[in-house]
């Protein structure tokens, strides 16, 4: 299992799950993903709050997993 440590309340895995579902259902720019989460049940299912999905946090996750994208 690949692990990328995160210093946030929401793990990189939760962020990646939210981004993956967003890409499949309603692809939006990163700055709109938090707003999208507010109108879905996904944040509840993932145990996160929409305000935790701001574009800076999403970008940090993408930056953290990028060096391992071939493994993923």
Image (cartoon, rainbow, N blue to C red):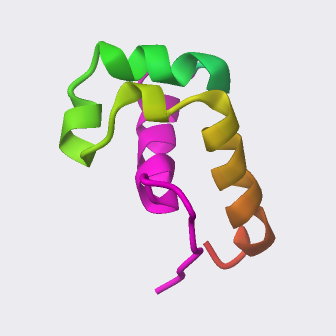
Look at 41% across and 37% down and name the residue there. 21
Relative horizontal placement of residue 57, taking residue 12 as reference (left or right):
right
| Rendered location of residue 40, percent (x, y) | 27, 20
Q: Which residues are magenta?
A: 1-27
| Residue 29 seen in the current view | no
Q: Position of residue 47 (x, y in %)?
A: 24, 46
Residue at figure coordinates x 52%, y 59% from the top left: 12
Residue, far bottom: 1
Task: List x then y, in percent, for residue 52.
Answer: 46, 35
Point out the image quarter for the C terminus. bottom right
Residue 13 highlighted magenta (yes or no): yes
Residue 39 visible = yes
Q: Is residue 46 above or below residue 5?
A: above
Where residue 9 appears, as percent x and y from the top left, is: 43, 54
Q: Residue at x 64, y 20 (%)?
A: 31
Q: Nearer the viewer, residue 41 or 27?
A: 41
Q: Is residue 41 magenta?
A: no
Q: How many marks?
A: 0
Q: Quadrant of residue 28?
A: top right
Residue drawn 44% across the image and 26% down it? 51
Compared with residue 54, is residue 63 higher up or lower down, i.e. above or below? below
Decide: is 21 above or below 61: above
């Amino acid at each position: 299992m690949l692990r990328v440590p995160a210093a946030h309340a929401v793990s990189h895995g939760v962020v990646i799950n939210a981004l993956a579902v967003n890409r499949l259902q309603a692809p939006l720019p990163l700055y709109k993903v938090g707003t999208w989460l507010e109108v879905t049940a996904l944040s509840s299912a993932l145990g996160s709050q929409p305000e935790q999905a701001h574009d800076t946090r999403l970008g940090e996750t993408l930056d953290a997993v990028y060096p391992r994208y071939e493994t993923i």
